[in-house]
Amino acid sequence: MSAAASAVDPLQRFRLSDQYQTLKSNLHRFLIQQIEERNLDVSHWDDDKLDRFVKEQVKRYVVDNRLPVNQRESEALASDARHELTGFGPIQHLVDDPTVNDIVVNGPGAVFVERGGVLEVAPVRFTDDSHVIRVIQRILAPIGRRVDESTPMVDARLPDGSRVNAIIPPIALNGPCLSIRKFRTSPLTADDLLRYDSISQAEVDYLKARVIGRTNLIVVGGTGSGKTTFLNLISQWIPDAERVITVEDAAELRLENTHVVRLETRPPNLEGQRAITARDLVRNALRMRPDRIIVGEVRGDEVLDMLQAMNTGHDGSMTTLHANSTKDAISRMELLAGFAGFNGSELTFRGQIASSIHLFVHVARLASGARKLIAITEIQGIDGVNLKLRDLFRYDPATGQRHDLRGAA
Ligand SMILES: Nc1ncnc2c1ncn2[C@@H]1O[C@H](COP(=O)(O)OP(=O)(O)O)[C@@H](O)[C@H]1O
Ligand SMILES: [Mg+2]
C-alpha cells in the first residue's frame, strides 16, 4: 500500500499529492528568492522570527497567486516550507518525534519509520530525487561530509550520536536512499530488557557473572537485532577498576566505566587515502595496556587481531558479529580470516577460535518485531575439526519457551 493511498485525512492526502509537491517546490523557490533579493541572514534568526517570516511570505504567495488553499492547508504549507528552509524537509517532524527509532527513505516516494520494533509507512514524501539529495546534503554538511558521484555512499555519525547512511544513484537503483538510526538518549537497561521479555533473570545473572569473570564473548545477530544494545548493556558490568578500550566505526557504545578510552575508525578521504581501519585501532589498542578491548562490530580483517587480543591476556574482551546463528558466525569468521590473509588451515583457525572465544550470545528480532536473546552457547573445545558447542540457555520462538540447559548432559 502506498503512503498516499493509506492517508485518510484530507489534509494528509493533499500533502501527498503531486499538486502539493509542485506547490511546495515553487514556494520554496519563492522563499529563497525573497531571502536572496533582500539579502536576509536567516541563519542567524531565532525560531520565532523565522516562523513569522515564512508565515507572512506564504500568505502573500497564496494571495498573489490566487491559490485555492484553505487556512489549514496554508498553515501546513508554512510549516513544511519552514522545514524545507532550515530543517530536514519532509522528515523533520519524524526526526523530532521521540517515538520514532529509525527513519528509512527508499527513494522520494517511499518513507518508512520504525516505532517499537515495527516498520510502518510514513505518510510523507519527497518531491523527487534531487529533493532527497538536498536533504541528505543538509544532514551531512555540519559534519563535513557529502554525497556525490565520486562518493555515492556515506556512513556517518551525527553530533547527537545518530547514525546516518546514504546511498544515491546510479548505485542505488530506486532513487537516493537514506537511513537514520536515532540515538537513544538513554540506553536500554537490564530492567528494560527484562520488562520487554527479551531476556530472563537467570540469563542476566549468568551473563553478569561471566562478564565479571572475564569471559571472551561475541554477540551475534542480524541487522537491527539489538547486538550493539546488548553489548553496551553487558559492558556496564565490567568492574570499574579495569581499563577498557573501545574500537568502533561509529561510536555508539556508552560505557559508564571510569577507565574507558574510545577510538573511532576514519573513512578514507576523497583521494581514497588516510583511512584508519578497525584493524589499525585494535593493534594500537593493544599497545595502550588495556585490560579489555571491546570492538563494536567485527566485519573485516580485524577479526584476526581481535582473536589474538583475546588469546594474549586481554580476557574479557567482547565484540559483535553480523550472523544469523552461532554456526553462521563461525563460518563468517573463517571467511573474514581468509580475506585478511590468514594462511593456516581451517583446523588451526578453529583451534584459535576455540582457545580465544568462550561464549556466544545470539540475539534476534522476531517476525513480530520483538527482540529476544535466542541462545547462550559455550565453546567447549575442539573435537577433530569441529568446534564443540553447547547451548546453556535457549529460547524457542515457536513456543515462546525458555530453556535453561545448564544441568542437561
Ligand atoms: N531488547 C530490545 N527491545 C526493544 N528494542 C531494542 C532491543 N534491543 C535493541 N533495541 C532497539 O533496536 C534498535 C537496533 O538495535 P541495535 O542494538 O543498534 O542493533 P544492531 O547492533 O544489531 O544492529 C535500536 O533502536 C535499539 O534501541
Ligand atoms: Mg550494531
Image (cartoon, helix red, strand yellow):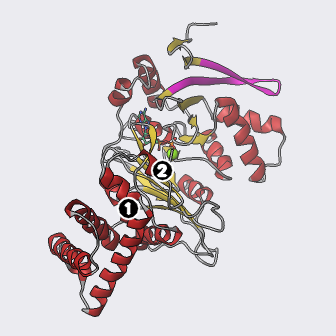
Q: Amino acid at mark 1?
A: Pro
288 up-or-down from 81: above or below? above
Residue 313 can be seen, yes or no: no
Judge by depth and name the residue closer to the eye, 120 or 73: 73
Residue mark closest to the camera, 1 vs 2? 1
Residue 380 lies in the magenta-colored region: yes
230 up-or-down from 196: above or below? below
Left or right: 378, with 245 as reference point: right
Please give the name of the residue rendered at 24% of the width and 85% of the height, measured from the top-left corner: 41
Residue 146: horizontal and vertical position, in percent? 50, 73
Left or right: 401, with 58 as reference point: right
302 up-or-down from 63: above or below? above
CA–CA distance between discs 1 and 2?
36 Å
Please give the name of the residue rendered at 82% of the width and 34% of the height, measured from the top-left corner: 347
What residue is shown with label 1? 90
Residue 348 can be seen, yes or no: yes
Residue 219: horizontal and vertical position, in percent? 55, 35
Q: Secondary structure at mark 2?
A: strand
> Of the numbered discs in the image, which one, if any, rests on residue 246?
2
Q: Secondary structure at mark 1?
A: helix
Please give the name of the residue rendered at 29% of the width and 79% of the height, measured from the top-left corner: 65
Judge by depth and name the residue closer to the eye, 281 or 320: 320
Quadrant of ligand 1 in image = top left
Classified by dominant secondary structure, the portion drawn in magenta counts as: strand
Q: Residues within 10 Å of mark 2 (few under 14, many from 20)?
A: many
> Of the numbered discs in the image, which one, if any, rests on residue 399?
none
User: Where are the magenta residues, as a range?
Assistant: 373-391
Residue 313 lies in the magenta-colored region: no
Contact, mark 1 vs mark 2 (Cβ under 8 Å): no
Residue 101: horizontal and vertical position, in percent? 39, 46
